[in-house]
Image: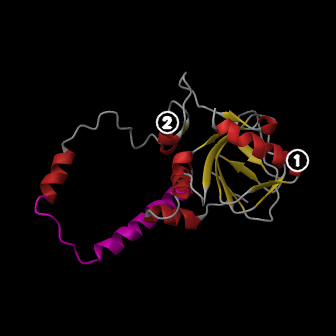
């Protein structure tokens, strides 16, 4: 079933956890009203905890420094109510990390089976890899298992993985031992933000072997 993953949202509100997980939680809060409400409540709780702490000493010029920054122009700052980047239709939180092609479009790399991908290297590390995945109508990802937890947030469109239907703002959480085959539902392309904390394990080992060989070459293009 679609998950909200309160633990990841809690970590995001606290400013902790891997960068990839924090980005996913920020995007979910932008798309899912329930997730947004949870983050706001958690932030309010953390604010209350901070208010109860003894104040720390500050430099004598701290107030002057803050007031000086407040007078700086905010040209180009997005409207707080506009959570989507109009140039991509995706959450603004993703914009600094997405590679663009020379024409200004998204710089997708191709994987086997018609899947397209953008690896978000800036927020990926040895514990978690974040990537955008594009599935066109009628497409999908081959049946696979997981070597670690896999979190998939739907950004546009919808998919069904054989267990549940996931729409924009929904999160699919797959643990090791859970086999599924995400397939696009409807006539709209499905774009997802996926965070993988383990090796992707296709049911067909030949598919996985070919994909592992091709993937490093794609990322050098």
Q: Residues within 10 Å of mark 1 (few under 14, many from 20)?
A: few
> For the residues marked 2 and 1, what is the alpha-carbon distance in whole angstroms?
38 Å
Q: Relative to the observer, which residue lies in front, 155 or 196?
A: 196
Q: Secondary structure at mark 1?
A: helix
Q: Residue at horizontal 39%, vertical 69%?
A: 46
For marks 2 and 1, the one nearer the N-term is 2
- Taking the view exactly as shown, the residue that stands out farthest to the left is 60
Question: Within the magenta stretch, is there residue 97?
Answer: no
- Residue 91, can we see it? no
Q: Secondary structure at mark 2?
A: strand
How many discs appear? 2
Magenta residues, start to end: 34-61
Vertical arrangement, residue 131 with respect to residue 8, above or below:
above
Vertical arrangement, residue 108 with respect to residue 153, above or below:
above
- Residue at label 1? 206
- Taking the view exactly as shown, the residue that stands out farthest to the top is 103
- Residue 13, can we see it? yes
Q: Residue at horizontal 24%, vertical 37%?
A: 73
Residue 41: x percent and y percent?
45, 65
Q: Are marks 2 and 1 in contact (CB under 8 Å)?
A: no
Q: Relative to the observer, which residue lies in front, 66 or 28?
A: 66
Q: Residues within 10 Å of mark 2 (few under 14, many from 20)?
A: some
Query: In which quadrant of the rendered image does the C terminus lie?
Result: top right
Question: Within the magenta stretch, is there residue 53?
Answer: yes
- Residue at label 2? 85
Quadrant in the picture for residue 103:
top right
């Amino acid at each position: 079933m679609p998950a909200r993953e309160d633990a990841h949202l809690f970590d995001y509100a606290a400013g902790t956890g891997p960068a990839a997980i924090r980005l996913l939680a920020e995007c979910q809060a932008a798309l899912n009203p329930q997730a947004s409400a949870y983050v706001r409540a958690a932030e309010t709780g953390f604010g209350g905890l901070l208010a109860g702490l003894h104040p720390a000493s500050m430099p004598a010029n701290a107030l002057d420094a803050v007031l000086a920054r407040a007078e700086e122009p905010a040209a180009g700052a997005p409207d707080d109510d506009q959570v989507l980047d109009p140039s991509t239709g995706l959450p603004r939180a993703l914009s600094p990390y997405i590679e663009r092609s020379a024409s200004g479009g998204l710089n997708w790399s191709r994987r086997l089976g018609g899947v397209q991908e953008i690896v978000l290297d800036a927020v990926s590390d040895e514990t978690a890899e974040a990537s955008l995945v594009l599935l066109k109508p009628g497409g999908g990802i081959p049946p696979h298992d997981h070597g670690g937890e896999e979190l998939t947030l739907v950004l546009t469109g919808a998919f069904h993985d054989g267990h549940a239907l996931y729409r924009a703002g929904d999160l699919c959480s797959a643990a090791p031992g859970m086999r599924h085959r995400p397939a696009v539902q409807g006539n709209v392309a499905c774009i997802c933000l996926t965070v993988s904390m383990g090796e992707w394990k296709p049911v067909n080992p030949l598919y996985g072997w070919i994909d592992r060989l091709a993937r490093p070459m794609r990322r050098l293009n």
